[in-house]
Amino acid sequence: MVMVRTVPKKDFKQERAKEFLAEAEDILSSMGKGLVKLGRGVKAGVIDPVVLNGIFRAAHTLKGMAGIYEFKDMAELSHSLEDALDSLRLGKTTLDDGVMGALMGAYELLARIASAKGGTGFAPELASIKARLAHTPQGRANSEVGIDDELKALLTEYEEHRLRENIRDGRNIFMVNCNFPIGTFDKDYLELVDIIKTRAELIATLPSSRTNHERLYFDILLGTPDGIAAFNGLIGGRHGAAVRPAGEGRAPVPQPQPAAPMVGADAPSLRRSGNTVRVSIAKLDRIMNQIGELGVLKSNLSRLSVALKGVKEFSIYGIELSRTEAGFERKLNELRSGVLDIRMVPIGQLFSRFEPFIEKLGRETGKEVRMLANGEETELDKLVIEELADPLMHIIRNAVDHALEPASAREAAGKPAYGTITLSAWQKGNHAVVEVKDDGCGIDDGFVREKAAQKGIAPPEYLAGLSRQEAIELIFTPGFSTRDTVNETSGRGVGMDVVKENITRLSGAIDVETVKGKGTRIILTIPVTLAIIAALIVETSGARYAVPLASVVEITELRPGPSYPARRADSSGYVTALGVELPAVRLSEFFGKPAFDRDVVYGIIAGPAEHRLCVIVDRLVEELDVIIKPLPRMIRAPGVAGAADMGEKGTMLVLDVTGIFEEISGRAPQRLKA
Amino acid sequence: MRVLAFFLDGEEYALDVADIVEVLRPRPVTEVPAQPGFIMGILCVNGEMIPVFDLRARLGLKGDARPYGRIIVAAADEQKAGLAVDGLLGVKEPPLRLFVPISQSEAGLNRGFFKGTFMDEGWNIRLLSASGIIRLS
């Protein structure tokens, strides 16, 4: 809603267009495959309705998407294509070589528009293709096969057409009555359908009026060359299925029920995809906000019940109300986790986008590259997935470009001539680990040191004192790039410092492991969702803050002593923890508030290894899951990542530990002054 | 023109109702460190974090600080802010012919906070500009 409107990404539209074009490519490639199959069918005189439907669906999806993203030419052409395909699948027109040519022409033009990124100048061709699509021969008249009127009333135009075709082909038409428990009907239904499809064409699934609270009843209309006994044997009585010749003995006449599942779409194949819906994240955010508001209402109820309990004659109602409120809270939590769950998508969606990308990189660099993917089912928040796309792309680009050796060098080193990029993901607590592994030459720390010295990143004596791992991590330093020449792929890319920045923005960490001659792993650890985080609530100088638990390494109790030189004049100092001296900062002083005098305070050791610090607070309060929201745009607060609405507990600031570290270590002097 | 009129230091001010999202009763505002003095903090309204301004301080009025009576949530240029005011007078419809726009020289001086004043015939309301107040330069 408003949140979405007030924090637009600058390149949001462009990003979406990019996303669309990537998806359009996928759709077009499946459409292309379908058309090839269809073409073969036309020559052989057999047209597979499943293939035709697949192409129709692809055109339909493309039309919708092109419309949304305002690719006018593409929308117009896919619309014409969809119309032509619709007439074909309804048997209104006949598919011959001429029509096939028009379909192929439309497909090729669509592919060209897509690769021109929706560019213009296709108008003349567009017009001619559209004209060809519109000129298709008339099909057989439908009236030559009669259908029972009662049945006809239940069927869509397409289903009716398929029924006629089946009758015309001399197949037996059966009705299978079946029923499923509501909880598992989708799975059970698909299982039964899969069995049916081995020997029959599924013409229509009709809901039955016998459906009750526990079981859903369906009548499946099908056409098969088998006899009734053979078909009964195939189904084997699964799910109470009984096979009857259509039109006779049909148990209680099914009434059309528009609200029932499986009805409403206009073809069985479209229906199958009806099990899922696409929802914009903005809508889910809106629901999330409403859940937040319900939480506020809940706390009002809670106040009311406490008040009622205090009044003698009403106390019984107060108790009743608080019980109701507890139930309400439980349901609310379920609702919240349900909505969060909807936002989760498998990372395989993202991985599969990289396959053509890697192939293209391989072609550009003249290297043969293969991609492997593991853990595609790992789920992350859709927004996190989208935020990962660019960093992963840069990492992969770097790997293909710099890490993978030419085939000859690989063979000389005893490796396969082709390089392999392996994308893996797995869940680790409320984080996901995403790894890009290559089997290239590894990173040479000596080379990195040399480059860093050349670029003036640090003096040579400092560089010489670094460990091998520390030296390798210099690749994440701004201004570092081992590139000697700007080339086709990495030349357009960005440095690893930008990748790191993007990952840090997701509250994630990036690590590198490399073995010379064997390969490199870049490991990203990111929260599975940005919307909700587990937080440690702390209190200092009377104010409460949320610290993302993901960043917390350890919590220690601090008493004045050698390890904790308390009451220093400056806000920062050092404490010894985890066996090392860490920079420490009192949160109250960092935020410019008067410190309360306390004997015992708590040190929260947090942050990624190289940015670790100890934040000193007065008190630990509790652990909570919080929904983190961005601060208003006009407010810039170093060390604050956002705010969390806690309902009855008010609004709380969420700390950005890395931001605090950067402030106190003076890495952002320009911000300190501001 | 319909305006929402309110009090600040005993004077009458108003905002165009079209710029107003809602009016809230006083509630705890979360302080954010390192902000200009007129930003009291942030508040969660309909799931969105919005800043809350001490309108008296924002306008540079000298009066003593006192507890505010209402927070007016106003929107301009796709940004929202809560404006803490002493109390509401309600929605009014002052006749447009009584409106005296602020002069160019004055507009520069008051940083675009004021649009002008409805004067005479018993009216004396200063009309504020929501976008001028919300926009931070």
Image (cartoon, coloured by chain):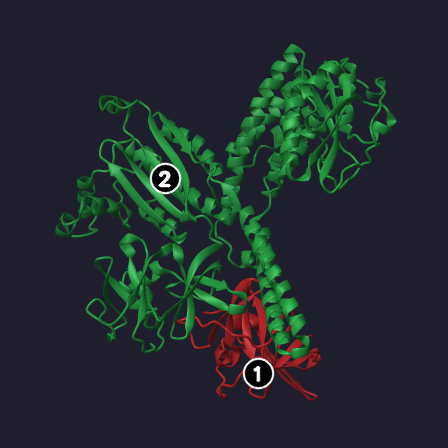
Q: Identify residue type, mark 1.
A: Asp
Q: Which chain is green?
A: A
For residue A420, above or below residue A40: below
- Residue B84 picture location, percent across and down: 55, 77
Number of residue marks? 2
In terms of depth relative to the viewer, which is nearer, A166 or B35?
A166
Give the position of the C terminus of chain A as an image quadrant. Answer: bottom left
* Image quadrant where residue A330 sits: bottom right
Q: Which chain is red?
A: B
Q: CB of mark 1 within 8 Å of CB of mark 2?
A: no
Task: Residue under label 2, please give it.
Answer: A435
Residue that carries the numbered disc 1 in the rendered image: B86
Cα distance in 3D space between marks 1 and 2? 57 Å
> Regarding mark 2 in the picture, which secondary structure is present there?
strand
- What residue sits 57% from the left and 50% below the top? A338
Q: Position of residue A375 (x, y in %)?
A: 43, 36
Q: Secondary structure at mark 1?
A: loop
Residue B83 makes an appearance in the image: yes
Quadrant of residue A223 within the rendered picture: top right
- Residue ID at (66%, 71%): A316
Residue drawn at x 58%, y 19% is A36
Q: Tell me: B136 left or right of A416.
A: right
**Amino acid type assigned to the residue bearing label 2 in the image:** Glu
The disc numbered 1 marks a residue on which chain?
A: B
Observer-side mark, 1 or 2, equals 2
